[in-house]
C-alpha cells in the first residue's frame, strides 16, 4: 500500500499566481481625485484666512486707509499662494512613480486654481463680515484683491514644480 501523499502547498489556489491578471496601476480611483481636490480647496480656505489676518490693511495689521498698503495686501496673497504651491507641488512631485499621475496632476493644478479663488473669496468675505471695512470716501480702501495676477501664482507654482521635477527625473534617466 502506498502512503498518502500530501498536497502541494498552494495547490488549492486557482489560478496560480503565475497566471493571475496583473493589477491595474495606470488609473487612480475617483476617491483619490476627490481627495486631492478637497485638499487644495481646504488649503485655499486656510490661505484666505491667513491673508485676511496677516495682510497689511487686514484684520490684525495695518490700516486700509493708507494707499501704500494696498499693493502689499496683494503681494501677501501672492506670497501665501507661492508657499502653498511649493508645498502641494512638492508633495505631488515626490509621488511621481505612483499610479494615476496624469489625473492627479490635472486635479492638483485645477484644484489649486479653485483654491486660489477660494482664498480670495474667504479673505474678502471675512473682511466684509468682520472688517476692516475701509472708507466710502477713499476708493480702494476696502479689503479686496486689486491685482488679479496674484491669484495665478499658486496654480502656476504647482505646475512649474511638477514640470521641473519631471524634467530633472527624465534627464537623470537619460544619463544612465
Image (cartoon, rainbow, N blue to C red):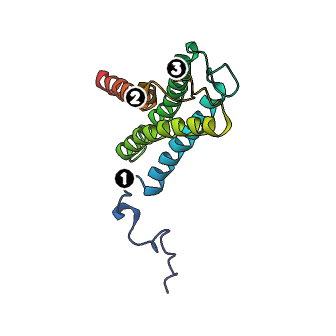
Name the mark on residue 75.
3
Separation of marks 3 and 1 at Cα, in angstroms: 38 Å
Separation of marks 2 and 3 at Cα, in angstroms: 15 Å
Residue drawn 58% across and 16% down? 69
Q: Could you tell me how many numbered marks the image carries?
A: 3
Residue drawn 40% across and 72% down? 14
Residue drawn 58% across and 35% down? 123
**Element under disc 2:** helix
Q: Which residue in the rendered view is the most extreme toward the top?
A: 68
The residue at which mark 1 appears reads as: 27
Q: Is residue 73 above or below residue 124?
A: above
**Quadrant assignment for the C terminus:** top left
Horizontal and vertical percent position of residue 78: 50, 24
The residue at which mark 2 appears reads as: 156
Q: Quadrant of residue 126?
A: top right
Horizontal and vertical percent position of residue 135: 60, 26
**Element under disc 1:** loop
Q: Earlier in the sequence, mark 2 or mark 1?
A: 1
Observer-nearest of 171 and 13: 171
Horizontal and vertical percent position of residue 53: 66, 29
Separation of marks 2 and 1 at Cα, in angstroms: 25 Å
**Element under disc 3:** helix
Observer-nearest of 154 and 163: 154
**Of marks 2 and 1, the one in the foreground:** 2
Q: Earlier in the sequence, mark 2 or mark 3?
A: 3
Amino acid at each position: 500500500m502506498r502512503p498518502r501523499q500530501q498536497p502541494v502547498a498552494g495547490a488549492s489556489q486557482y489560478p496560480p499566481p503565475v497566471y493571475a491578471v496583473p493589477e491595474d496601476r495606470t488609473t487612480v480611483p475617483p476617491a483619490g481625485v476627490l481627495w486631492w481636490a478637497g485638499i487644495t480647496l481646504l488649503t485655499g480656505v486656510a490661505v484666505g484666512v491667513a491673508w485676511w489676518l496677516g495682510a497689511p490693511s487686514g484684520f490684525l495689521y495695518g490700516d486700509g486707509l493708507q494707499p501704500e498698503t494696498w499693493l502689499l495686501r496683494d503681494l501677501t496673497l501672492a506670497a501665501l499662494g507661492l508657499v502653498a504651491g511649493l508645498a502641494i507641488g512638492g508633495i505631488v512631485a515626490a509621488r511621481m512613480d505612483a499610479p494615476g499621475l496624469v489625473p492627479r496632476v490635472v486635479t492638483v493644478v485645477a484644484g489649486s486654481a479653485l483654491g486660489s479663488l477660494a482664498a480670495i473669496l474667504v479673505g474678502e468675505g471675512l473682511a466684509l463680515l468682520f472688517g476692516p471695512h475701509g472708507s466710502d470716501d477713499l476708493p480702494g480702501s476696502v479689503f479686496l484683491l486689486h491685482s488679479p495676477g496674484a491669484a495665478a501664482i499658486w496654480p502656476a507654482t504647482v505646475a512649474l514644480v511638477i514640470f521641473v521635477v519631471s524634467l530633472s527625473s527624465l534627464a537623470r534617466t537619460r544619463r544612465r
